[in-house]
Image (cartoon, rainbow, N blue to C red):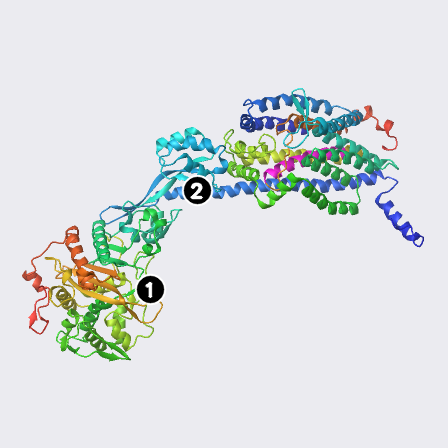
Amino acid sequence: MRNNTPSSPERSNAMSAIWRRIWPSRPDPDKSRRIARARLLVAGAMATSCFMGISAKAVWLVSGQDEAKNGQMQTQANAARGAIYDRKGRLLASTLPIMRLHLDPKMVLNPYEVATKLAPLLPGKSEQDILKALARKSRYVELDRKITPARHAAIMQLGLPGVNISATSLRSYPHGPEAAHLVGQVDRDGQGIAGVEKSMQAKLAAGENVNLSIDLGVQAIVRQSLSHQIERFEAVGGASLVMDMKNGEIISLVSLPDYDPNHFAEARDDARFNRATKGVFEMGSIFKVLNTAIALESDAASLVSSYDVSKPLRISGYSIRDFHPRKRALNLSEVLVYSSNIGSAKIAEAIGPEIQQSYMEKLGLLNRPALELPETAQPLMPRKWGRLSTITISYGYGLSVSPVHAVGAIAAAAGNGEFIAPTLLLREPDEVFERTRIFSAETNRKVRSMMRLVVSHKDGTANYADAPGYLVGAKTGSAEKLKIGARGYNKKANLTSIVAAFPIHDPRYLIFVMVDEPKPQKFSHGYATAGWVAAPVIAEIVKKAAPVLGVLPVDIKAPEIRQNLEPNLNIGGKGAIFASF
Amino acid sequence: MMLTCTLLLMVLGAVLVMAASPPVAERIGLAEHHFVFRQIFFMLPALLVMLVTSILTERTIRILCLLGGMVITGLMVATLAIGPEVKGATRWLMLGGLRLQPSEFIKPILVIISAWLLGLWREQEGFPGWAWASAVVGVIVAILILQPDVGMTAVVVLTFGFQMFLAGLPLLLIGVALALAPLAVIMAYSFLDHVRLRVDKFFTGGNLQTERSIQSFVEGGWYGVGPGDGRVKLHLPDAHADFIFSVAAEEYGLIACLFLIGLFGFIVIRGYAQSLIAKDMFSMLAVSGLATQFGVQAAIHMASSLNLIPTKGMTLPFISYGGSSLVASGLTLGLILALSRKQHPSEQENFAPEQMMPEASR
């Protein structure tokens, strides 16, 4: 206390007055008791809130757990997720109940005891493996996903804390990579994240089965044939579609490289990509089928129309050339059979941009397809659909579409003239579905006959696509790929494709095959064009798949077949030639 | 009512020790039901102490507490010198085959003595009761810190603080005390290594014991996993003592926990209610002080198993295993019963505090 300076006696007095108030020398028991009672009430309130707080925390912890338990119940309900079958009832995806063995290292009392007792019960796991698993920081270390009932019982008998077995489910794809892209994938909670698993999620999650239009037999044939050709030509990948032109059912959908959906995590990004539905490409010359059909249907051309292809066509600073230049005028069928770019360009000029665009629209080439897959693509269209675009689109440049787009559109031109949106779901026998007539029977007959000549005529580009007795008609396309990250086209990176219909006199199936960036080979005499790369795949698929699909070989000279084809086609200026030869 | 609750707690304690202790016993190489038998064995002296104490007169209580306080303080000093060191602390005295923890008994006795001194301060002129009480508590706290026993220190200091608050400590000084409290916490943090460790772990979340304790609440859910099926007891070092609330949570569920919290809460509030109508300052301070001590100890035990505060090895009165704890809890409840029973008119005739302190009871 520094207040004992002589100058401040008042201050000293004031201090002691305050002190007396704080520490009264004369007690007042009644007042003290009143104060004590009041403060006791305060203390009571504090004690109550303290115990309430403890209760609240306990309730909070436990009710949080309830939600977690509900979550577990949900995953158990997923055990009943519906299966996916092909058109003949073969299983593509199903959910299996499995027992999973997992460790909680924190709950384990003696890691060595666990390791020595558990190792003999786990084939393929040594004591070291188990000790290593137990050294992990995680609270959940999976040791085995497939515990048999006998081992389950033996492990439970050990009574080791921290060694847990829980029932769970596994989405199994018995055919592995065969239909990987179209079946898709589920996440670890059993929810569809890709393919039919995602697009049919609501139905599958409700326990309903899904029957696809896919024929697993055809799928295997297509996958094997395409894969073989990709290997032979050292290509980067490929895609193939087989569609039933009568009802739009997709019989086969293959994208290569693919992956095993049972081990999805190990799949490369490239393998996960569905080229058949998600990739968009400039399809090249196979678009000439559409160009010819549109020209005939819109009366922009007839079988006798003639186009001078002797000189390259110059337009807006670009020069359009032919792969096999001919020094004369070609008729309409010759333009298709010889695959003349100049001829196609002249036909397109006669059609005009508006009519071409309206047909492309009706053929579904300008919109995302209504396919039952999440992996579909929006086409890449020219910003301004002018004269130049019309010309390039006529032979397949300037409009990028996915293979499933191309299949839907070309089926209308090569089939019976109706556009049917491709579907992956099996149609009911009496199902009524949307079909839009776009081409007349007359146009179809002419286009089909020309496609047959592409295969059967010695100057056609798809001779290797022929499968004797099955009357294959086709059109090849070898498109240069756009340079990546630069303007212009890469002359060395080709996209070879072919679209084929069979049997051409009464077309039922459309096959599309695409091989991406094939390399020229010695056995192909340095060629890596669609005629060499893609066409043989068609022949192989038709020969092997026709019996599976129930298509019988025919006598190609029979009169009922001739009736369905156009007799008045003139190829090579040597008079009328019949399409079936 | 209070007696019923207490007996209920003792029965629950026996049940929970039976659930929690066998794995602990097995782990340290004792017979499976070693702790169970001992707990039940100690229930007899605990009951005896409680019942005998509850019928004592206020005067006897004061005298016995004064004498007992001196003896036990002596024993506590002795533990520092000759007590065996267990887990880094010397809190125990070996007495035959029994391990006695004198500090458990000093807690209720200290409440009585400080209530006595503070009551005198408020009712007798010129007696600086606050200073005497602070001095006595200071000595005990010093011994406790030397043991060291931070949990017990906290209980003793909190209880004394409560008594001072009730005895009319000016709000200004309460403010100062609250301002100084963080200083005490910081000192404990910086000078006691294991306190620092626990506090660090509380904030960084690296405490395995707490995680397991929390896990037991989650596993138990509302209804528990069932008696004997709990797992937390296999991992918590002192499941039968410092984490018995977690065992209760896992095996018997949230409902049982809320019931336990309710019982402790009821005893505390009931003690407060009794002291509200107490006839003098001493009874009021003694009964509410004992109830507070009882409640603080239970609250610290439950709060640390719920990770609301840093872990503190603290027994749950009547429930946790521990002979000294059990008998001392019996003593606490006996004292509460005795001092709140004083309102009975027949006894007031028999007992005349005027004879001892004429000024105090006008």
Considering every residue shown, the one lying at the far right of the view is A6
Q: Circle 1 — which element?
A: loop
Q: Earlier in the sequence, mark 1 or mark 2?
A: 2
Q: Is there any visible trace of residue B14 in the rendered image?
A: yes
For residue A213: magenta?
no
Report the residue at 66% width, 35% height from top. Answer: B297
Do circles 1 and 2 both sit on a common chain? Answer: yes
x and y percent of residue B271 in the render?
Answer: 71, 33
Indicate left or right for A6 with A364 as reference: right
Kindly identify the amino acid type of the residue bearing the numbered disc 2: Gln
Residue A103 found in image quarter: top left
User: Residue at 84% across / 28% down in the picture?
Assistant: B353
Q: Residue A72 has which mark?
A: 2
What secondary structure characterizes most of the magenta part? helix
State which region is magenta.
Answer: B285-306
Q: Which amino acid does label 1 sit on?
A: Gln
| Residue A43 falls in image quadrant | top right
Query: At numbered mark 2, what does the secondary structure look like: helix, strand or loop?
Result: helix
Write the residue at 20% across / 59% down.
A511
Q: Mark 1 lies on which chain?
A: A
Query: Residue B131, image x and y in percent?
Result: 82, 38
Image disc number at residue A378: 1
Residue at the (58%, 42%) spot, across then down = A57
For residue A90, the mark is none
* Image spot of residue A171 (x, y percent): 34, 45
Residue furthest top as drawn: B96
Q: In this view, does B130 lie above or below A507?
A: above
**C-alpha distance separating marks 1 and 2:** 39 Å
Check the residue under mark 2 and report the chain it is in: A
